[in-house]
Amino acid sequence: MTRINLNDLDPEFKHKIAEQPGGEGLKACFACKACTAACPIQPLDKRYDPRKIIRMALLGMKKQVLESDFIWLCSSCYGCQEVCPQNVRFTEVMYAIKNLAAREACIPPGLTVQRSLLKRHGRLYEVGDFENDKRLKFGLPPIVEHPEDFEALLPDQSVNNTPNHGATT
Amino acid sequence: MEALLYLGCTVPVRNLNYEVSARLTAKALGITFRDLEEFGCCGFPLKSLNVEDTLVTAARNLALAEREGLDICALCNACAGTLNEVAHQVRTNPETREKINQRLRLIGLHLEGNVRVRNFMRLLWEEVGVEGIRKAIVRPLEGIMLAPHYGCHYLKPSELNVGFDSPETPRTLSEMISATGATVVNYPSLLDCCGGGLLGFSEEIANAMAARKLEDVSQSGAHALVLVCPFCNVMYEGQQKKIAKSTGLDLKAPVVYYPQVLGLALGMTSEQLGFKLNRIKSATLLKIVEG
């Protein structure tokens, strides 16, 4: 087991998470572990353990949480959220943690690629003649890209675009 | 009834069998879909980066629908879930609504929050009903065994699905499968998550999550696994051969979309319903139904 040096902990970390949209419920956790029992990821990768992530956050282990690659393993199934007796809403707390990580530490490269695609096309996949010809063969109406709103809707300063260490691909 | 058909990003490019069968079956059951060219991404893919980006991206679609005065029907579980969640927040949280409208103003839109979002299955359940489906069947799928897969965002978060279905004991998809005359196959991993949400981060874990259900369904005697979400499809159909190879499991689980089997029972042909785009072929199923 790794020792934790109290001087490395950030007592503000839990408050910071709780200030994010969706992070509000973090401090209500009383460590019953229902979330972990409901999680389909935890049996496959022990590092992704909802109860443990909450304890790490409450202790102030900011670096170990935000710079880890396991925070990106949530499948967003809402299993933890459904069983929580304290209404922590852990799926949403994970989004709050990932948002903080994206701003302050590291982003898996795939996510920034998706964001720039979205700004360029207004959708995740580019739709060109090839796709629309195929649609036409099935009698389906063409898809017309409308990217014009997304430059204004998604300003660049809202995420840290520099790829950093620690993130898996 | 009339609704705006929300296609999202994946279905209109990669799952034309789902789109074409949904449009055909809806029409046959008295639902009029209208297309809105301006619809864009639902915002779900941005949520890990910035929740507020998801809010405004979803809200843009909601505001466009509200301007048309029509409800939204989404085919993808993740799109339906995200749009529904944001509509719920806008309705219940005036502060969020104001924040969203500040950004929407930049593109000349405004959102009150009156638009209702349902996935296609909920629309069928509430607007046509199981009895309505049963009455419309002209070719009951007798002798066909089908395994349902709901998908997480069909059922959860449950606060968004009050009055529709239960995350622990779901029944709507099963009952709508029964209504076609087919037999519903129950299997142990019915409620499992497909793993699609983390395919981009760990293919190994995602595949391990999907493997259990594929194994259960292969052993259950079902002629097909019935889906309603393109994300789940990526795992169960797109990854199936890879999973079989890496695990050594003998997987043979044809994958179909619910409106495809519904369409067969409504008398449509497998060709009309886009079955040739299904990559794990439902040969036995189609042989029993079409001969």
Image (cartoon, grey):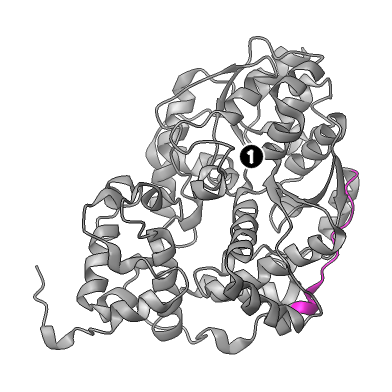
| Residue denoted by label 1 | B228
Instruction: Give the SS element for disc 1.
Output: loop
Q: Is residue B5 left or right of residue B229?
A: right
Report the residue at 27% width, 72% height from top.
Answer: A57
Q: Tag 1: residue type?
A: Val
Camera-nearest residue between B29 and B14: B29
Expressed as whole percent of the image width and height from the top left, the position of residue B159 reads 51, 49
Q: Quadrant of residue B282?
A: top right
Residue A67 visible in this rendered orientation of the protein = no
Q: Against B221, is B208 above or below?
A: below
Q: Residue at x 82, y 71 (%)?
A: A146
In the image, residue B9 above or below residue A38: below
Q: Does residue B9 appear left or right of residue B206 in this picture?
A: right
Q: Is residue B198 above or below residue A37?
A: below
Q: How many numbered circles are shown?
A: 1
Against B74, residue B24 (above or below) is above
Q: Residue furthest top?
A: B143
Front in this rendered view, residue A111 or B61: B61
Question: Residue A118, can we see it?
Answer: yes
Does the magenta segment cover residue A141? yes
State yes or no: residue B164 in magenta.
no
On the rendered image, what quadrant is the N terminus of chain B found in? top right
Image quarter in which the C terminus of chain B is found:
top right
Identify which residue is drawn at 58% across, 45% down: B238
Expressed as whole percent of the image width and height from the top left, the position of residue A164 reads 41, 83
Q: Position of residue B95 (x, y in %)?
A: 58, 75
Q: Which residue occupies 60% across, 69% down?
A: B54
Q: Main secondary structure of the magenta part?
A: loop
Magenta part of the protein: which range?
Answer: A139-149
Chain of the residue where label 1 is placed in the rendered structure? B
Badge 1: residue crowd in 10 Å (few <14, some 14–19, many ≥20): many
Q: Position of residue A54 (x, y in %)?
A: 27, 65
